[in-house]
Image (spheres, coloured by chain):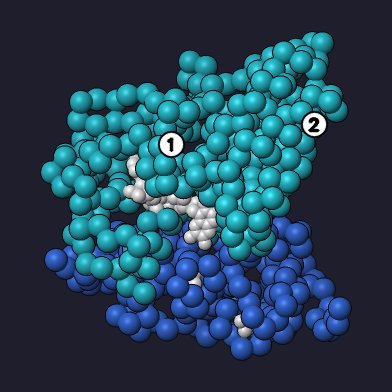
Amino acid sequence: MNKEISLTVNGEAHTVSVEPRLLLVHLIRENLNLTGTHIGCDTSSCGACTILMDGKSVKSCTILAVQANGHSLETIEGVSAEGQLNPLQNGFKQNHGLHCGFCTPGMIMRATELLASNPNPTEEEIRWGISGNLCRCTGYNNIVKAILHASATMQGLEPASTEPQFV
Amino acid sequence: MIPQSFEYETPSTLQDAIGLLEKYGEDAKILSGGHSLIPMMKLRFASPEYIIDINNIPGLDYIKEEAGLVKLGALVREADVEHSDLLKTHFPIFADVAKQIADPQVRNRATVAGNLAHGDAANDQPAVMLALRASVVITGSAGARIVPIDEFFFGFYTTAIQPNEILTEIQIPVPPSGTGSAYHKLERKVGDYATAGVGVQLTLDGKGICTAIGIGLTNVNPVPLRAERSEAALLGKPINEATIAEAAKYAAEDCNPSTDLRGSDEYKRAMVAVLLKRMIIKATERALA
Ligand SMILES: Cc1cc2nc3c(=O)[nH]c(=O)nc-3n(C[C@H](O)[C@H](O)[C@H](O)COP(=O)(O)OP(=O)(O)OC[C@H]3O[C@@H](n4cnc5c(N)ncnc54)[C@H](O)[C@@H]3O)c2cc1C
Ligand code: FES
Ligand code: FES
């Protein structure tokens, strides 16, 4: 039997009727047409579907849409105000933190919570912090640099050089 | 990957949740963190007819100390354990284990109680609770009963929880001073289940004699295993090279790992011995610190 649920997504209120078995990621992508949140696996492993639920990063492929009733979600579509790249998006752009871009929305949503709880993380803390997000392209180094870049900018510091490093 | 259809209930009190379990019996499943259950439903390894979501029951997410026990409510998430100061003071083992369970997003949802209730020897908290000699509170319509962790795991995916009951609390005795604990698992990559894992808690008296010991093993036996002979080899004795070697030998002999993608039976036994040695040493260092 369908359930009616109310939730806020990127500040906008929605009321929708859903089957209990509908996964949150499908609600986001198919009912709300927010296709920036990706699906990269069937095993809750890749993190491409990461969104924020009440400020906490979660894998939206492993939550039922009905469980989001009464909660506030943020997806990649909600992070930039008026078309301006936010510090994380800019960090990824400046540091070549993406190649194909498939993992990027999940990485950015995960890094959003990471920086909110730890504004000045070490490289190691970042690597542990994104351990639930897989990237098949970059080899992660530039993603780590991108997050360090964002961390510096958000603290009003000068980010490290964005010259690519070949290691 | 979409689960089979089911009816969804979201009770707002424990009584209502138990009432629903009474009504639907074995056709119902409790949903807490959902990070074992939903993946299994997506793969159609589980197809419950009724899902009873307990996430909207208030007051189940406490971590508190009371009458010599640290108590964790059913909705304490792995991430809460990772960041709890109360747990940090008494149980350094939680800082070890929390970091090794899955990944940050999974830990934001997964509950410690669910990790036990799932009844999977591959999960990490069972061995930790064996080491800490915890008990669980299981609540049904007739009231609550306290079950020691040694009587909790029955077999693969089966525990002492009956279909009409809910695991409502975990109780861990606060250890005396001179106690240290540690956990480590060998994993192929972050987020993987253990190839082998070992949890240890031990207490030393002023002369360095071991006066209390708990050792739990992860994923090397059909059910989470207490290494009893290893414990006996250390209890009442000093921690030294000889007693550690004896304990490690017994644990490797007494577990029953199966050969799989993570390694052979022989390899896993060897790793249990190595990990147990290291965890005894780490727990001892922490007990002395
Ligand atoms: C990618 C990934 C990696 C993981 N890696 C690890 C790992 O390395 N180590 C590890 O230990 N775990 C790991 N897990 C499992 C994770 O910790 C699970 O979430 C946990 O095992 C189950 O807890 P849960 O709260 O999610 O329970 P759920 O999935 O909600 O429930 C699991 C089972 O327990 C029952 N149940 C749950 N709570 C109760 C209760 N209070 N009373 C009665 N029955 C209950 C449910 O009905 C169900 O049968 C991983 C999970 C994922 C998705
Ligand atoms: S789609 Fe891979 S973790 Fe959600
Ligand atoms: S940029 Fe392609 S998967 Fe990360």
Q: Chain of mark 2?
A: B
Q: Chain of mark 1?
A: B
Q: Are marks 1 and 2 on the same chain?
A: yes
* Chain depicted in cyan: B
Q: Is residue B101 left or right of residue B120?
A: right
Q: Amino acid at mark 1?
A: Phe
Residue at 28% across / 37% down in the picture?
A: B162
Answer yes or no: is residue A53 visible.
yes
Q: Kindly identify which residue carries mark 2.
A: B245
Q: Where residue A116 sits in the image (x, y, percent)?
A: 59, 59
Please give the label number shown on residue B153.
1
Q: Is residue B174 left or right of residue B7?
A: right
* Chain depicted in blue: A
Seen in the picture, residue B5 relative to B250 is either above or below; the reply is below
B220 and B46: which is toward the camera: B220
Quadrant of the rendering where the N terminus of chain A is positioned: bottom left
Quarter-of-image position of residue B83: top right
* Label 1 or label 2, whichever comes before in sequence order: 1
Please give the label number shown on residue A163.
none
Residue at 72% across / 47% down in the picture?
A: B271
Q: Where residue B203 sits in the image (x, y, percent)?
A: 70, 19
Crowd around label 2: few <14 · some 14–19 · many ≥20 (10 Å): some
